[in-house]
Amino acid sequence: MTENTQQGRILVIDDEAQITRVLRAALTAQGYQVRTANDPEEGLQLYREWTPDLVITDLMMPTMTGVDVCRAIRLIAATPVIVLSVRDHERSKIEALDAGADDYVTKPFNIQELLARVRAHLRRAPERTTQAIEVGDFVVDSPAHLVTVLGNAIRLTPKEFDLLLFLARNPGKVMTHRVLLTSVWGADAAHQPEYLRVFVGQLRKKLEAETGKQYIQTEPWVGYRFVPEGLEAGARD
């Protein structure tokens, strides 16, 4: 196994199938593990499930832009993001970098130059953590897809787990409805708050049934706050 394979997991998001094929071939030849998506929503779902070390995304795609992808990733992680674009306008570069992109490469690009940038960003990137999150009463083990509260295992659906994992990474902070919907369900769900109400309700019931404590506070008209130490019954809203 090469060094690249050990520490280089790369996700490529581009609606042009030819681009994803070329990049997959070039990156795989260098020993990286590569996954591709031709749809940004699919790409973000892959990101949440696979936790790559670096993301390469196109700027202009039909349903979401590379800027949207950057913003969604930056809500939960500091993974390096390289944006590809046919646009060489200064404003496009600034917008992408302000959204959290680490690099901006104009199409058509030299593949060797892109590979050099990939190597540079991976050298600077923090190591991917596989450790469980321990916060308050909770242990959230992402690799094992396991949650324990006060030492008791809680059975959660995949989306309930994703929602709790995001909240556990942001304890004590008010997470707006839009941020939660975009991060857990994707940009298409940003205006469908019923998703959030249903899953927060399900998550609360499971956590409170096990402990009698309340961990998710409602911030009226804004969003939710995760309190990992829990509140006494009746103190939530």
Image: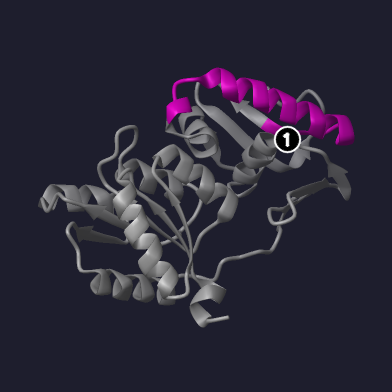
> Looking at the image, which residue is at 81% across and 31% down?
206
- Segment tinted magenta in the rendering: 188-216
Q: Where 102 sits versus 156, above or below?
A: below
Q: Secondary structure at mark 1?
A: loop
Q: Is residue 213 magenta?
A: yes
Q: How many marks?
A: 1
Q: Where 8 sits versus 199, above or below?
A: below
Residue nearest the viewer, comparing 203 with 106 = 106
> Looking at the image, which residue is at 59% across and 31% down?
224
Q: Where 209 sits versus 58, above or below?
A: above
Q: Is residue 34 left or right of residue 144?
A: left
Q: Quarter holding the N terminus?
A: bottom right
Q: Does the rendering let one see residue 100?
A: no
Residue nearest the viewer, comparing 99 with 16 = 16
Q: Is residue 93 left or right of residue 1?
A: left
Where does label 1 land, which residue?
A: 157
> Looking at the image, which residue is at 62% across and 42% down?
167
Most prominent secondary structure in the magenta stretch?
helix
